Image: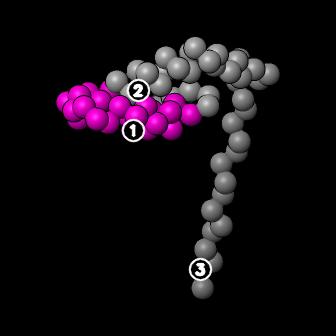
Amino acid sequence: MATLAQPSTPPEKPIPSAYQGASQEPPLTEDQHRRLVAVAAYYLAERRNFEPGFEVQDWLAAELQVGSEGMTIS
């Protein structure tokens, strides 16, 4: 009777020294945050061919996309 081999887990890779102790980016200033929201809102409006009457919805959706620390790329 054959026995099944247990799957082995790969060894953990060491973290390159360039990344060890790296600090995170400083938080966005209010002006940087507002500019990112404005750009995101512009592109949201552009997607619907700048149809008027949705400016507030575009701004609020852009604020959600940008979040508090900056836009995420997806």
Q: Residue at x 65, y 48 (%)?
A: 10
Q: Residue at x 51, y 38 (%)?
A: 64
Residue under label 3: 2
Our reading of the magenta stretch's main secondary structure is helix
Q: Residues within 10 Å of mark 2 (few under 14, many from 20)?
A: many
| Disc 1/disc 3 C-alpha distance (Å) | 64 Å
Residue under label 2: 40
* Circle nearer the N terminus (2, 1): 2
- The kind of residue tagged 1 is Gln
Residue 25: image x %, image y %?
68, 19
Residue stretch in magenta:
43-67
* Circle nearer the N terminus (1, 3): 3
Q: Nearer the viewer, mark 2 or mark 1?
A: 1
Q: Is residue 12 left or right of residue 72?
A: right
Q: Camera-side residue: 7 or 33?
A: 33
Residue under label 1: 57
| Disc 3/disc 2 C-alpha distance (Å) | 60 Å
Q: Residue at x 33, y 26 (%)?
A: 43
The reply to whether the C-beta atoms of the residues labelled 3 and 2 are less than 8 Å apart is: no
Residue 44 to residue 8: above or below? above
Q: Camera-side residue: 56 or 22?
A: 56
- The kind of residue tagged 2 is Ala
Residue 73: image x %, image y %?
46, 31
- The kind of residue tagged 3 is Ala
As helix, strand or loop, the secondary structure at mark 2 comes to helix
From where the camera sits, is residue 65 visible? no
Q: Residue at x 62, y 18 (%)?
A: 30
